[in-house]
Image: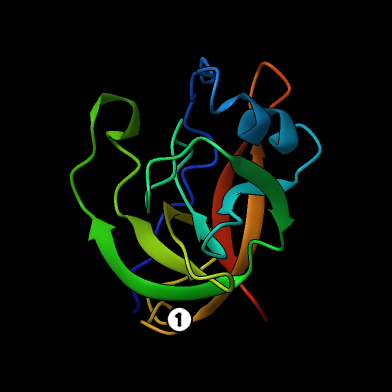
Amino acid sequence: MAETVNDTLDVVREPPVPRSFSRPFWEGTRQKKLLVQFDRRIGKYQFFPRPNSLFNGHRELEWREVSGKGEIFTYTIARRGPPGFRGKEPYLIATVTLDVGVNVIGNIVHCGLDEIAIGTKVKPYWLPLANGTHLLMFEPVR
């Protein structure tokens, strides 16, 4: 019998307190849109939100909506969770390389241990939070 994993969708998560430079990201999640910073000077995306370019330090970044599709770069099976996740183990956490080339860490939902693999194609799954924003998670493309 295959081991099952928990989606952790019932774990209570506190909504974020956005910083000035991350506010556009969190506002985008209200409409389930993934906004990622883009450095036009060099033509590259960066994630997580920062006040300056990761590449050259300037502040002239723009926000671009991306699909959120990508593939699993690496993953782990969490068998011991922090307080809010205790009793929900095991669950999946992955680093996903988005189609635009940035890595995002998030929970993988709607996926069994028999399906999870490096290279698995994934798409966004948006978990509603109490303040109207959504937490980005991922689920396999089927």
Residue 27: x %, y % from top left? 71, 28
Please determine whether, in this image, residue 68 is positioned above or below residue 130. below
Q: Furthest-left residue in view? A: 80
SS state under label 1: loop
Q: Is residue 66 left or right of residue 72?
A: right
Residue that numbered label 1 is attached to? 115
| Local crowd size for mark 1, using a 10 Å CA cut-off: few (<14), some (14–19), many (≥20) | few
Point 57% across, 46% down: residue: 136
Point 35% across, 77% down: residue: 2
Residue 123: x %, y % from top left? 64, 66
Please determine whether, in this image, residue 48 is positioned above or below residue 117. above
Residue 91: x %, y % from top left? 35, 54
Q: Amino acid at mark 1?
A: Glu
In the rendered image, the quadrant that contains the N terminus is: bottom left
Residue 100: x %, y % from top left? 58, 69
Quadrant of the image occupied by residue 81: top left
Please determine whether, in this image, residue 84 is positioned above or below residue 32. above
Q: Is residue 1 left or right of residue 106?
A: left
In the rendered image, the quadrant that contains the C terminus is: bottom right
Which one is in front, 98 or 90?
A: 98
